[in-house]
Amino acid sequence: MMNLKNLLSRALLALSLLAGAATASPVYHVALDTAAASGDGYMQIDFLPFGTSDVLTATISNLDGAFTGTPDLVNVTQAGGALTFKSDAFSEFFQSILLGGKFGFDVMFGGTPSDAGSTGLTVSLLDSAGNYLSPDPAVQISLVAGEAPAVVTDPAFATVNPVPEPADWMLVATGLILLGAMQQRRRT
């Protein structure tokens, strides 16, 4: 009887951890450092579909840095401090910035392509004349059906790190509590 209870407890723990991990939508923190440049410039964020009919979203929040002027938004909605891009057409955020400082934001994706196509979010930095500071985007995150998001950065300008969700921390805490409770029961 004790072995059956043990087995059921472990199965329940594994199931709860897997359920939480499967429903989590990844959030990434993008950090840009433009200390290598100075003066006026621009930040360009594009969200583009490539051969997919699925309509996906990318939501950018916690946008921080030395922004100047008003952003030019194409197929992007702005609400409550967040920017939402849709992949049903070309989506772009184009904003004037002061180079020489740090910029950052969090990005969360709504879905992944279910067909053979892909969708990509790119972040580029430009000088005041409109020339790219790097031949490649500072950040590129690609979403492809059946694959984990692919993140590519230009190390001279950017880093991208996953952001743990509060639900992830709660799952870890729950798992540790259950493991502690199981150990306590074994001792008694």
Image (cartoon, rainbow, N blue to C red):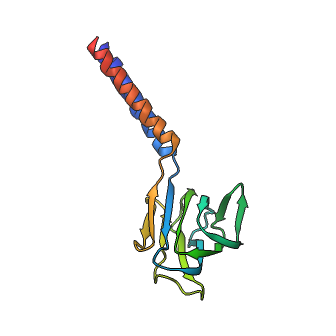
Residue depicted at 53% across the width and 64% down the height: 115
Name the residue nearer the viewer: 87 or 72: 72
Counting the numbered discs, the total is 0
Q: Residue 138 placed where, x, y %?
A: 48, 74
Q: Residue 81 placed where, x, y %?
A: 68, 57
**Residue 119 seen from this side:** no
On screen, residue 78 above or below 177: below
145 sits to left or right of 93 = left
Q: Residue 89 placed where, x, y %?
A: 66, 72
Residue depicted at 51% across the width and 40% down the height: 167
Residue 18, located in which quarter of the rendered image?
A: top left
Residue depicted at 38% across the width and 23% down the height: 9
On screen, residue 18 above or below 2: below
185 sits to left or right of 146 = left
For the C terminus, which image quadrant? top left
**Residue 121 seen from this side:** yes
Q: Residue 82 placed where, x, y %?
A: 66, 58
Residue depicted at 60% across the width and 69% down the height: 66
Q: Residue furthest top?
A: 188
97 sits to left or right of 17 = right
For the N terminus, which image quadrant? top left
Name the residue nearer the viewer: 115 or 131: 131
Q: Residue furthest left?
A: 187
